[in-house]
Image: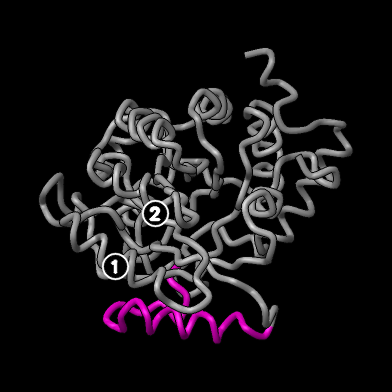
Amino acid sequence: MNRLAPYTDFPTFLKRHFPFKVQKISLDAGFTCPNRDGSKGWGGCTYCNNQTFNPDYCRRGQGIARQLEEGKRFFAHKYPEMKYLAYFQAYTNTYGELEDLKRKYEEALAADGVAGLVIGTRPDCMPDKLLDYLAGLKERTFVLVEYGLETTCDRTLARINRGHTWAESADAVRRTHERGLLCGGHVILGLPGETQEDIWKQAEDISRLPLDTLKLHQLQLIRGTRMAREYEECPADFHLFGADEYLETVVGYIERLRPGIALERFLSQSPKELLVAPDWGLKNYEFAHRLQRRMRELDTYQGKKYAEI
């Protein structure tokens, strides 16, 4: 754990693996999802609009090498000597034929300055043959597989049209870890029907998995999504956090989280033109500063209540 932070932060995690600074470059490699194309369902997850997290340089149709070059130009002014991680982010980046997946990953790794891969995907889209390939790949480069877990509650997973269960999530994480691959997760705090107690219980369930990294995001309602329409029709079904309430919820979450899981993010920052609610006007680093200050005030830290589980 970083001695300056009351939790294990993502820069500390990266320093374990790289002797130089690295920056993710998001890629849209032209994937779709099994609950969009009819394989598992239609319409996608009820909260999902990929426009909310694709940066300007990440444009489908430009090709992987072109997106990486534009991404490097975007970040080069910060640290000219920086290396990069090709972040396959948009949609489900393991959903395809194995040879096509290999070609896309290898194209990214062939780009100058790329030091590894981060692959975002769903727990139900990770076949053993692909895991075997990635296990071989990590012998020569950095590989982090990041699963969209979203929640540990099967009732909620069904409500938001995820198309998989918590058992499938846990199985995917364990199979990934068993092959020696680094494994990350992503969860959304405040999904409809979940209480603060449910969220804190989620931290206990997450802690039982061999995860290396975790992203926390508050629920945001995004224009054009099914969830935004549901909110308009029945706002009483939703409890949207205020910033202070969310802060206290995250503190409690981290207290119950296994020490050593690196926390990468705490906020989703959706474009204002797409955001319905809530709009806190906070950036992730600003929230992280508030969070650290609050945890020091409470004399608490990651895993303080984990031993009580």
Percent x, y of residue 145: 42, 48
Q: In the rendering, which numbered label is found on residue 104?
A: 1
Residue 177's place in the image compared with 306, above or below, is: below
- Relative placement, left or right, of 100 versus 295 is left
Which residue is found at the position 85% from the left and 47% from the top? 4
Mark 1 falls on what kind of element?
helix
Residue 244 in the image: x percent, y percent? Answer: 71, 46
- Residue 110 position, x and y percent, is 40, 73
Q: Residue at x 46, y 84 (%)?
A: 69
- Please determine whether, in this image, residue 239 is positioned above or below residue 104: above
Image: 294 above or below 73: above
- Left or right of residue 265, residue 167 in this image: left
Disc 2 marks which residue? 120
| Magenta residue span | 53-77
In-front residue for pair 36/220: 36
Q: Quadrant of the N terminus?
A: top right
